[in-house]
Image (cartoon, rainbow, N blue to C red):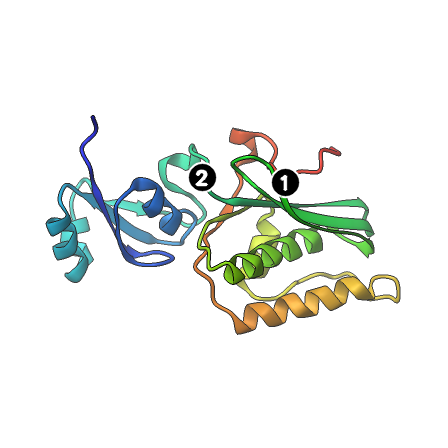
Amino acid sequence: MAKKKFYVVWKGVKPGIYNSWEECEAQVSGFENALYKSFPTQEEAEKAFSGNPWKSLNNPHAKKVKSGTSPKSAAKILTGSIAVDAACSGNPGLMEYRGVFVADSVEIFHVGPMEEGTNNIGEFLAIVHALALLKKKESAIPIYSDSVNAMKWVANKKCNTKLAQTTANKPIFDLIERAEAWLRSNSYPNPILKWETKLWGEIPADFGRK
């Protein structure tokens, strides 16, 4: 039986002491320059957490996550999470997006199709939709997206689309405005993680039209 470990996160989504690797991983995966380390006892973990992290990390066993990567080379999928994706027929074209639970692929929201949208816009809106939904449920579970652009837009709180607004796609731009306002007004504990398609296959929220 594996020995129990206690995980200290000095720099991550929510710094603290965690009782399992899964809880720790959710705080550090994809978090730029995250600082964390495991300890064999809770007493050691508490002492390390209250002190200077570099005293604990300045050794060959220190673990540090580089920007854009996740622990263990992103080899493990966090099943207690939500995956989001978008689809667009044309560019621009009919756009829709949805979110599903990774564990069982059960759909939890689906918006569209909406006229004259783009895939990047849909990916952006899907992440924000998931964040807002999880905030209402007071849930800190991770969100997976396979869109680097959308993740950057969310981090910058701005949908950086070059699409021109028209009468047909005004409902989409209304959603964008609401999403940007939500990001400016809210904080969230949820890690937004890159779905590693080359390792894991298509994201569970994929519409299956490729």
Residue at coordinates 45% horizontally, 47% vertically from top-left? 68
Q: Earlier in the sequence, mark 2 or mark 1?
A: 2
Q: Quadrant of the N terminus?
A: top left
Farthest front residue in view: 137
Q: Are marks 2 and 1 in contact (CB under 8 Å)?
A: no
Name the residue carrying label 2.
Answer: 78
Q: Position of residue 137 (x, y in %)?
A: 51, 58
Image position of 184 (left or right of 120):
left
Residue count near mark 1 (Cα–Cα under 10 Å), binned few <14, some 14–19, many ≥20: many
Residue at coordinates 40% horizontally, 35% vertically from top-left? 73
Badge 2 marks a residue whose secondary structure is loop
Residue at coordinates 39% horizontally, 47% vertically from top-left? 26
Image position of 163 (left or right of 146):
right
Q: Amino acid at mark 2?
A: Leu
Residue at coordinates 11% horizontally, 50% vertically from top-left? 44
Q: Which image quadrant for residue 165?
A: bottom right
Q: Position of residue 157 (x, y in %)?
A: 57, 66
Q: Position of residue 144 (x, y in %)?
A: 53, 45
Q: Amino acid at mark 1?
A: Ala
Image position of 186 (left or right of 92):
left
Q: Quadrant of the C terminus?
A: top right
Name the residue carrying label 1.
Answer: 205
Location of residue 199 with respect to 143 vertically, above or below: above
Residue count near mark 2 (Cα–Cα under 10 Å), binned few <14, some 14–19, many ≥20: many
Q: Position of residue 63 (x, y in %)?
A: 26, 44
